[in-house]
Amino acid sequence: MATGDVVVDGLWKTFRIYQQRSSTLKQAVLRRGNEVYEEFWALRDVTFEVPAGTTVGLIGANGAGKSTMLKVLSRILVPDKGSVHVDGKVSALLELGAGFHPELSGRENVFLNGTILGMTQADINSRFDEIVAFAGLEHAIDNTVKTYSSGMQARLGFAVAVAIEPDILIVDEVLAVGDEEFQRRSLERMNELRSGGRTAILVSHGLATVQQVCDTAVWLDHGQVKAVGGAEDVINQYLRSVSPDVRLDAKGREHLGSGEIEVDVEITSGGSAVDAIESGTPIEVDMRWRADTPLTNLRFQFLVHATDGQVVAGDVIHDESVNSVGAGPGGLCYSVPGFDLLPGSYHLSVSVTDAQSGHLYDSATNVAHLDVHPRGSQIELPGYVPLGGRWTRRG
Amino acid sequence: MAESVVGALKEASGYRDLMFNLTQRELRSRYRRSFLGWGWSLLQPAMMTAVYAIMLGYYLKVTPEAGDPSGIDVYAFFLLAGLLPFNYFSASLTTGMGTIVNAGGLMTRVWFPRLLLPMSSILALSVSLMIEMGILAVVVVAFTQEFMILALLPVAIVLVVLLVLFTMGSALFLTAANVRFRDVEYLTSVMLLAYFYLTPILYSPTFIPQKELPLIPLDLRQIALANPMARFAMAFRNVFYDVRLPGLPTMLWLVFWSVLAFYLGTRYFVRRSDRFAEMM
């Protein structure tokens, strides 16, 4: 095994759910040691490998055993059967502010948490500024941690966890807490670790995140491995099982998701529907929906794809002013002052998800089509985006 | 994984900076917030000594024999030499035992050698013990001009090390047991009270009658002195009250108990610690 390899082989983990538990000596004596419990297998014969330098995502419904798996990998829980081989230095970030002491300052907590993760005092000293800068807490590092917001705690926790330069980084859902900027930097940092040959194992309900950062994925279902393989492939299998019935809308388009809300999109320009424009024309992406029940905490997204499916552009909104909808029809309009993509054929996909859990309410691909024609005497350029630069000759 | 005691201790030593951090945190939080700071930790034994000296030394006339060969006959010194180690033992068990149970969240969220939590809290108390012992030595020397005590200080340090081992072993055992049965804590505090009065600390071992016992070839005093804490009290008294070296049998007895308790306590703790997260 090389440093950074993780091998999970035939792993079983059981929990006892007690109906009658003797948690004191007094009870144990009174009940003469009788305890009544049921065994619950949280993990059943789980086998997978993570080669060094890859990132794997664990996906599955709540209670599928993902978090238990991470706890076994990070030694908090011991397996009942089977084995786990983790080769190298492990850094686990399982819960927000795990190991933070609310009464101590951020500075003291960096040292405490760092040493809990196995760093030496000297290591932390030499990286302290870097950690604080990454967390963006230069101004607040001497305040007690109880005054920190959950985002600040997540940032500090992540900053310390990656500072130890682990061979294997284990992350559970924590990244979802930070703001977009922090999430972007965290993902960047994880990619850096990956290209540095480090291994990462993460649990996320945001399937998009998994697809974005993971090479492979393991789908757990009731403690068993349902599928292992390329991230996209496993995610698709998972999605298909979660919403087995692909719905068709009035226009015969395929929709996925739980279906409490159904979105339709039209591209308009100057108030009328269009399916072909000249490059640079102002357009609107006109989203209309019908919801069966009131929903909150929504995240609307549309993506612009090229003919090969490549995402060229897109935007999301989960602003408080629009993220709740009542039952019935509703809509959102996204205006583009000048749709500047290079000539070609594009199509849109949309999705509505829960902003926190990532639960998919509705998604549809190919909901609108847009041909972009050259503007005037525009010459043919490679790619999708005009750079708008100018050539000048030297010498 | 780390089933063996040596393996577990080795692993823990890789985290010595954490141990240092935790100990420091413990010491700081104990003394930072109080106006008198370190003074508070001395107030408790001083107060107890004063009360016992009045009650036992003056009212009840419990007068232990004078130190041999020093001739010191101050009851307060006699008492403190035994009281400080016992207080340390008792405080270590009480605070050590809570460390794992009270760290519930930490247990289920991060892994680190679990030994560090009780050990660091006991280490912090050991620092206090050293300071108290140091002050006792200075006070006794100042009152009695027995400068030999200073020459015996290395022996006192050896005794402190043995006491720390014995205490850690006992505390680790009880800490792990307390995770399984949460009333071990209460039981222990009751037992400690009984243990305190049965251990010759307020009185000298010569107060225990040499009464023959049925079935066993030992008398009552011999049984009472098999108690390791009684031997610790006697050995510390040898240094600070009698001003002489403790006897070889006492030292061997203490080494035996300290090593045994430390080994067994650590072994039990390490074996149980894999399951701590599930028992929270």
Image (tube, helix red, strand yellow):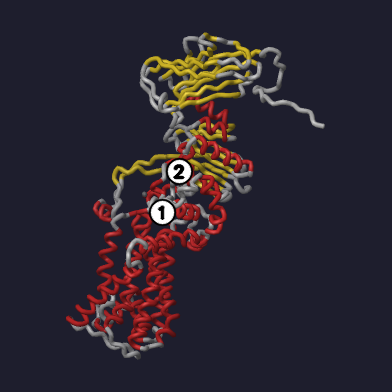
Residue B271: assigned label:
none
Q: In this view, does B215 lie above or below A305?
A: below
Precedes in sequence: disc 1 or disc 2: 1
Secondary structure at badge 1 equals loop
Which amino acid does the dot numbered 1 rest on? Answer: Leu
Which residue is the site of mark 2?
Answer: A152
Which amino acid does the dot numbered 2 rest on? Answer: Met
Q: How far apart are marks 1 and 2 (CA)?
A: 15 Å
Chain ID of residue with mark 2? A
Local crowd size for mark 2, using a 10 Å CA cut-off: few (<14), some (14–19), many (≥20): many
**Does A270 sit left or right of B119 as displayed?**
right
Residue nearer the viewer, A138 or A98: A138
The picture places residue A171, in percent across and down from the top left corner, at: 50, 42
Contact (Cβ within 8 Å) of mark 1 with mark 2: no
Outermost residue on the front side: it is A395
- The structure residue drawn at horizontal position 61% and vertical position 21%, both measured from the top left corner, is A309
**Does B116 sit left or right of B201 as displayed?**
right
Q: In this view, does B75 lie above or below A144?
A: below
The picture places residue A151, in percent across and down from the top left corner, at: 45, 40
Asked which quadrant contains residue B95, the reply is: bottom left
The picture places residue A88, in percent across and down from the top left corner, at: 58, 50
Residue nearer the viewer, B17 or B97: B17
- The structure residue drawn at horizontal position 42% and vertical position 75%, both measured from the top left corner, is B255
Asked which quadrant contains residue A234, the reply is: top right
Which residue is the site of mark 1?
Answer: A104
Residue nearer the viewer, A247 or A155: A155
- Camera sees residue A61: yes
Q: In this view, does B214 lie above or below B2?
A: below
